[in-house]
Image (cartoon, rainbow, N blue to C red):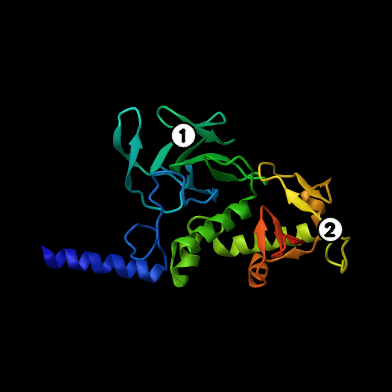
Amino acid sequence: MKRILSILLLAFCTTAHAGGVVDHYAWGGIAYPDETSTAGLPEAIPCITKKAFNGQPMIKCTWLETSREVLIWNPQRQQDVRYANQISGTCLRGKCRTNSTIVGEWNQDVFFALSIWYRIGTSTDGKPVAYRVDTSRQVSYAEAGSLLYQFYLDIGVPDDRLVGTFDGRYEGGYAAWQAQKEGAQTTASQSSGTSDQSEWPEVKTAWCNPRMDDECYINEKRVPVADLGKWLPAVAESNIDQIGGYCETILCFDSKDQPLGYLLQ
């Protein structure tokens, strides 16, 4: 019996290694969030379309394929209660429901699987995205992919497992995400007019409202996010870190709090 179990375990590990995928909770050294709250979870994650067990259409909005149980404090019962970290149900006539709860909206009649602490919604480009329950901003499908990929980096998914793991959580996989992300950056750059601009006006003050998606102020005058490139250059946060600066919301500053640029979305 032990020999059979050993063979099965070896086969499982070999398959997982060959596929280059981290899709369960058995990998050592990965700092998985405990899922007792929203802490450590990405703000949004992309959903993928697939077939349910009965062949019917389904959307899956989870950051790993497998599920597990977690203990979450229940104030009514005054004790920890065991919950599955993935829930399932049906989206019908625009509403996505479990047996007892509405957990989002989607415009197609499908089954769904959803990680806890998330609700089903729509990206800015009309695709299914799961938003963390404590966030209100809407993101593009590619940005949801970026948030998920960064999450994998943060929790320590090994470099040789990143692409394989991401492939199963994004429609079209890593290659599609790269193409869509680069296309969005090109469009944003063109619309902001920064491609040929080498000089910007003097900016003494700059800030963006973290509670609003499109409310920024340059020199005390309101400026749409799409027009930030007319005032400030696009910068990378890593470059700002190297010179001792910092970034807040989407704006970056030097160590003396002078505006340096904005993070291209």
Q: Place residue 20 in its image quadrant.
A: bottom left
Q: Residue at x 65, y 50 (%)?
A: 140
Foreground disc of the pair 1, 2: 2
Judged left or right of residue 61, residue 186 is right
Q: Amino acid at mark 1?
A: Thr
Q: Quadrant of residue 222?
A: top right
63 sits to left or right of 121: left
Q: Residues within 10 Å of mark 2 (few under 14, many from 20)?
A: some
Which residue occupies 87% across, 66% down?
197
Report crowding for label 1: few under 14, some 14 to 19, many 20 or more residues within 10 A (C-alpha): many
Q: How far apart, in angstroms, are the residues tagged by discs 1 and 2?
A: 51 Å
| 243 or 170: nearer the viewer | 243
Residue 108 at what x, y percent from top left?
A: 56, 36
Residue 38 seen in render: yes
* In the image: residue 117, left or right of residue 145: left
What percent of the width, then of the height, locates residue 174?
Answer: 56, 63
Give the quarter of the figure containing the C terminus: bottom right
List the residue tagged with mark 2. Answer: 203
Locate the N terminus and report the quarter of the image it occupies. bottom left
Numbered label tally? 2
Question: Disc 2 residue type?
Answer: Val
Circle on res. 90: 1
